Image (cartoon, grey):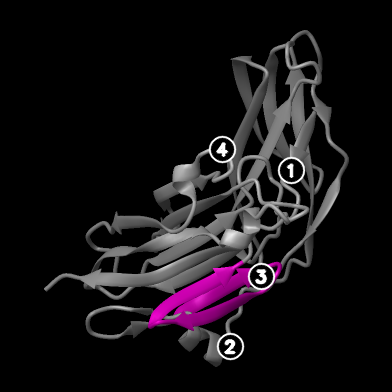
Amino acid sequence: MPSINPGTTLGPGRNHLGVSAQTLDLKTPLTGIGLEIDGHPVVALDLHGVTASRITVPLDIAPDTKAVSIRVLARAEGGVWEASDAREIPTVLQVTTPEQQTEFSIPSVARQIPAIRLRSSFGARLTLDNQRRTFAIHAPGLLAYELPGNVSALHGFLGLEEGAQAADNPHPSDGAEFVIRLRRSDGSTEELLRRAIQPQLRPSEKGEQAFRVVLPAGAANDVLTLEITPGLAGDASSDWTYWRDLTFETSP
């Protein structure tokens, strides 16, 4: 049974699309998974010894694209390639207003580094509480920053708001995934952090989670993206996710 994460949105430029497939009885081996874009296969992978799989596919979207038609491909042992129903996924503009560029800027020792892109299907906001800055971005969402030459690392916190899994929440979150990538000027991409949190299953992941990523040397003018996805199950219900107290570290 091939599927694509519900709540998925795409934006102009480079995207990372999560797709999954599993056999109906969870016993028959899955031997292949792939992706079709606008009627054309773009990736197909052979699998061995699994009954379920999830892959992330890099996908470049032209600036004037309004929507993309996507089908997930899967093949079970002894069978042929099967495709999910076609799904039309709209593209969401990643344009930030001057106010958003300032609100979602990240401080460094010397200056504020403004956000150059913001994408959020369910809205984003800045909250200030006891001098702590929280970027509340309901998954799926993305922030992007063009890096100056002297930035060496990024640290801060990530997590899910407490109410996302409260006992009286009729549709509690089942977790989310936080991914930080560096997009080089030559178009290549390097993943710096991928962290999935599932507080319902792992109580230690309740509340804010500290992180720090070291940026490669020579990252001047490269673009750092901070993306949040609905997580492994692809369910965005109550994914009240956030980044908090983000700070760029600089080198002399």
Q: What is the spatial separation of the Cα atoms under label 2 and label 1, in whole angstroms?
A: 31 Å
- Name the residue tied to disc 2: 97
Where is residue 181? Give x, y as percent: 43, 56
Between discs 4 and 1, the one toward the N terminus? 1
Q: Earlier in the sequence, mark 2 or mark 3?
A: 3
Q: Give the label on residue 4, or none.
A: 1
Q: How dense is the environment of label 4, judged by Cα within 10 Å: few (below 14), some, or many (20 and up)?
A: few
Q: Residue at x 60, y 36 (%)?
A: 55
Between disc 2 and disc 1, whose residue precedes?
A: 1
User: In the rendering, at what x and y percent does residue 81 appear?
Assistant: 79, 23
Main secondary structure found in the magenta portion:
strand
Look at mark 3 in the image and give the residue it sits on.
63
**Residue 143 colored in magenta in the image:** no
Name the residue that disc number 4 marks: 201
Instruction: Tell me the SS state at disc 2.
Output: loop
Would residue 175 be found to the left or right of residue 226 on screen? right
Mark 1 crowdedness (10 Å alpha carbons): few <14, some 14-19, many ≥20: many
The answer to whether residue 184 is above or below residue 43 is below
Between label 4 and label 1, give the one nearer the viewer: 4
